[in-house]
Image (cartoon, rainbow, N blue to C red):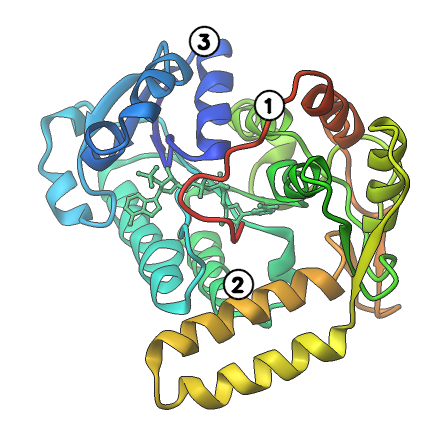
Amino acid sequence: MRVLLLGATGTIGQATAAALVRDGHEVVCLVRDKSIAQRNDLAVKLQQQLAGTKLQFGDALNVACCAKAEWLQPSFDALVSCLASRNGTPRDAWAIDYQAHADWLTLAVAKGIRHFVVLSALCVQKPLLGFQQAKLAFEKELMASGLTYSIVRPTAFFKSLSGQVKRLKQGKPFLLFGDGQLTSCKPISDHDLGQFMAQCLTDRQLQNTILPIGGPGPAVTPLQQGEYLFELMGMKPQYKRVPVALMDTVIGMLNLLGKVMPALADKAELARIGRYYATESMLVWDQEKQAYDEQATPSFGEETLFEHYKRMVENNIDVPLGEHSVF
Ligand SMILES: NC(=O)c1ccc[n+]([C@@H]2O[C@H](COP(=O)([O-])OP(=O)(O)OC[C@H]3O[C@@H](n4cnc5c(N)ncnc54)[C@H](OP(=O)(O)O)[C@@H]3O)[C@@H](O)[C@H]2O)c1
């Protein structure tokens, strides 16, 4: 198939590009110039990561301008989007996770693109945050569009659970919220999620549906992640426990100050995002039981978080979070 990929320079975008190429598709990636020009260290890596694809430069948020581009002729069989707000603030999320996607959807319909695959997030099932509401609003439009759709809602990514490895290497304690067992998740690797995104194009069971998806193996709590890492690194367990009430106090203060200083309103939202992930599991939510359900959370792929930790520690690797550390 001829596939247009948005957000190809991101963590899952790169993995999805590689998977689409492996699967034999003709892949065109829309990349903003900034990624190549300003971040030279990334340029070499990108050329390797997006190998086998064709790069086109343009502003994914300016769809009217892209619509006139020659590379949109002939049109595409499918549009795959891993485009997402990098900072998670409501303004950015509504501009990117909602509006840019809504504009691409309009263009896809006009150009006869038959299938739209979008990277969403499992947490939109309990939407308390601005970026979740923006994603949900687009999901609804996509489902009503008449196009074939695949809405991929993954659990936690490895990168979001890897920051503590660096802390431990620096001799700092493992950070826990509450007792470290308030939440659990079934982490999915970039490679496996990229493959799942690509598979949506050819597997009919992954079409016209919402797809919650986790990685292989049982769900893990933050405490289990800490226990595993201390054993792996041969270190004496050392935890710093942050009470949820403390986060609530900070959020309350930022909320108040945000009314007079807009920059602090963004910080309040980031704190709310932190609190959400500290207290909500990344598993399928059972509305009837009002509880998260590990068994109802599908698994895909082969790479486990603990294998990833082992590789990080044995090869002394840090996971780059890019310009942001929110997602
Ligand atoms: N982290 C987790 O555990 C987790 C779990 C489930 C779901 N998710 C969801 O996954 C998404 C994040 O995926 P990811 O980590 O792969 O994303 P990412 O690494 O942050 O990449 C975001 C992509 O969007 C592009 N982008 C962002 N703002 C743009 C703009 N203004 N104009 C043009 N392009 C723009 C970026 O391009 P540049 O490279 O040019 O900036 C990049 O290609 C989020 O929606 C999150 O909710 C995350």
Task: Find out if the beta carbon at label 2 lies less than 8 Å from the nearest ligand 1 atom.
Answer: yes
Sequence order check: which comes first, mark 1 or mark 2? 2
Identity of the amino acid at label 3?
Answer: Gly
Identity of the amino acid at label 1?
Answer: His
Q: Which residue is mark 1?
A: 191
Image height check: is 164 above or below 33? below
In-front residue for pair 251/184: 251
Disc 3 to disc 2, C-alpha distance: 33 Å
- Relative placement, left or right, of 297 versus 94 is right
In-front residue for pair 307/81: 307
Task: Check the image and name the residue furthest to the front.
Answer: 171
Q: Using the rendered view, name the quadrant where residue 229 is placed.
A: top right
Instruction: Look at 67% across and 16% down and name the residue there.
Output: 315
Q: Using the rendered view, name the quadrant where residue 87 is placed.
A: bottom left
Q: Which residue is mark 2?
A: 132
**Could you say whether the residue bearing mark 2 is in a helix, strand or loop?**
helix
x then y, percent, for residue 127: 60, 68
Sequence order check: which comes first, mark 3 or mark 2? 3
Q: Are marks 1 and 2 in contact (CB under 8 Å)?
A: no
In-front residue for pair 67/251: 251
- Relative placement, left or right, of 78 versus 135 is left
x then y, percent, for residue 175: 75, 54
Disc 1 to disc 2, C-alpha distance: 24 Å
- Relative placement, left or right, of 26 versus 226 is left
In-front residue for pair 138/307: 307
Q: Which residue is mark 3?
A: 24
